[in-house]
Image: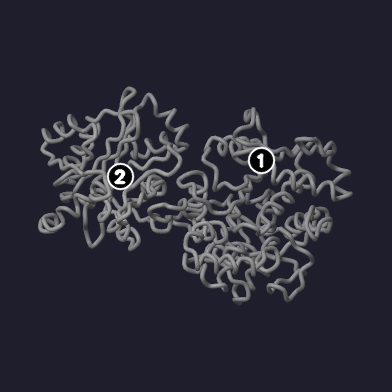
Amino acid sequence: MTLKTLQPQKNNLITNYSNPIIQYCDLIRSGKIIVCLKIKTEYFKLEQIILNPGIWHYDEVKANHAITFIERYCKHSKGKWGGESLVLELWQKAFVAAIYGFVGSNGLRKHTKALLVVARKNGKSTLSSSIGLYMQVADGEAGPEIFAVATKKDQAKIIWLEAKRMVKKSPTLRKKIKCLVAELVGEHNDSFFKFLASDSDNLDGLNPHCALADEIHAWKDQNLYDVIYDGMSARTQPLFLETTTAGTVREAVFDQEYAAASQSIFEIDGFKDDRLFAAIYELDNREEWKDPAMHIKANPGLGTIKDSEKLLDKVNAALANPTKQSNLLCKDFNVRDTVAGSWLNFDEINNEEIYKIEDFKDTYAVGGVDLSSTTDLTCATLLWKKDNKLYVRQMYFIARDIAEQKEHDDRVPYSAWEKQDLVKLCDGQRVNYSDVTAWFIEMRETYGIFPLWVGYDSWSAQYYTLEMQSNNFIMEEVRQGPQTMSAPMKELAAEFKERKINYNNNPLLKWNLTNTQVEIDKNDNIRPVKGRNSKQRIDGTVSLIDAYVIYVTHYEDYHNLI
C-alpha cells in the first residue's frame, strides 16, 4: 500500500463514511467500482447481515476501532510518502471491517480466518503488517503472539520488517513496542511479533493469536499450515490472515484454500464456512486482461496504489510477445497458471466437473498404463466416451514403505489421497504390478468398465503384459517418442481446451498435468517431459496420453462398438 490522502473523485472512492461495507456495496451496485463475481457475492452477503442481523450482527464500533488504529498509528515506512499516516482505500477499509465488525451475541468475532487474493503491487504486505500490529497492541488479547509466516525466512521477514519500520516511524507505537533484532516486544501486554518459516528451528508449542501467512501460492508444506492453524485453538478469537497473489504451484496449499473459499462464497453443495472471509480479486474471464476497464477486478488499488500506466505497458508488451503472458496473467491478474513452457495452462486443465462411476456400468473403454520405476509413481488410466465427452478414471500406485518419504520429497498429500481412493499403497518397497492388474480387473468386474485395448510403454513391462494378457486384456505398445505421441497430444490438448475431458476433478491428474512440459523437435513434433524439477511427477499425464493414443488408433472400431 503506497497511498497518500485520497481525493473523493479519485477512483470513485470516498474517505468519510460510517460503514465502508455498505458504501463499497453501493458503489459496486452502481457500477462505479468494477469487481469480480466472487467479491460482489461475498460483500453482498455481508451487506445482508448488516441489514438483517441474526446470529451475527455488525458492530460499527469494533470495525472502526481497527480502521482508526491503522490510519492513526501506522505509518508509511519508505517511498515518497514515508513517515506519513496510512490512509486506507475503501476496499481496504471494507476488508478490515469485514474481519473485525461482525460478531455474535457474545461479542466475539465471526471471522477467525481471512483470505486476501490480490495482484502484486496492491499493498497487501503493508495492510497485513498493520493488521498484525493492531492484533499485537489493540485487540485486547492477553499475551498475544503474532507471527509473520512463509515457507522461507526471507519471505516471512517482509511483513515483519514492514511492521518494524512502522513502529519506528510512529511515536505512539514506539512507546508500546520495543524493536529487537528478530522480534517486536510489547511489555505492556506481554506480546511479541516474530517471523516464522518452515525452515525455522522449532515449530512446536506455538500459541498464535494472529498468523499472517504470506504468499501461500508458494506453500507446498501442508505441515507448516497445520502447525500454525492448529496452534490457534487455545485463543478465544484468533485471526489467520492469508495474503497472496496467484501462482504456479498446483494442488498445494493455495489451491486447497482457493477451492474451499470459492465453495463457501457460492455455497456450493450447501457448504458455508461462517468463520472464513475471503476477498478474491481476480478476472472473471481469462481474456479480460486485454480490456483495460477490467484490470481493476484483480487490482483494486489500480490508479492509486498501483500505477495503471505501467500495467498497461506490461499488457501491451505481452500482447506483442506471448512468452510474457503467463507471468503477467498470473501475477498481475491472478489467473492461476502452470509454469512457462507447460503443455497446458491451468485454465485449460482445470475442470471441476464430477461424475459417478456407477452411471457408466457396462461401458467400453480404452486403457493406458505408465509403470515408471518400481520405486516411483505408477498410474493406470481408463478412458471412455459418452455424450460427446471423454471420461477419465485413474488409479495411482506407490510402494507403502517409501510413501512417507515420497510425500515429503514431492510435497503432496499421498496419505490424504489414499483415503480418497486415488492412490493405492503396495506392500513393501516396490510397486507391485499385480496390483495394477487387479485394479483393471476390479474396474471390469465390479464397475462394468471394459477396456478393449490397453496401451503401455514397453520399458520394464514384459512380465506385466503377460499377466494382463492372461487376464484377457489386449495389450498394445505405445512408443514414447514424438512421432507416436505428438499428434495425439495436440488433439488431446484441443479436447481439454474445449472442456471435453471430465476427469472427475482428480487432484493427482490435475497436479501431473500442471507439471507436464513439452519438448519440441525441429519438425514441431512434441512429447511430454518434466520441468527442471526432477521431483515433479507426470506419470498420470503419460498414462492418459497412452490411453488417448490407443483411442485415436482404434477410433473407428471403438465408435462402432459404442
Q: Is residue 390 left or right of residue 91?
A: left
The residue beneath circle 2 is 542
Q: Is residue 10 left or right of residue 458?
A: right
Which mark, by number, is residue 154?
1
Residue 494 sits in quarter: bottom left
Residue visible at 12% across and 58% down in the picture: 556
Q: Amino acid at mark 2?
A: Val
Query: In which quadrant will I find the C terminus?
Result: bottom left
Q: Is residue 504 above or below residue 288?
A: above
Q: Is residue 341 above or below residue 20?
A: above
Q: How far across and how far down the image is residue 529, in percent? A: 36, 45
Query: In which quadrant will I find the N terminus?
Result: bottom right
Q: Which residue is nearer to you in this view: 291 or 404? A: 291
Q: Earlier in the sequence, mark 2 or mark 1?
A: 1
Q: Amino acid at mark 1?
A: Asp
Q: Is residue 451 left or right of residue 414?
A: left
Residue visible at 18% across and 37% down in the picture: 441
Label 2 element class: helix
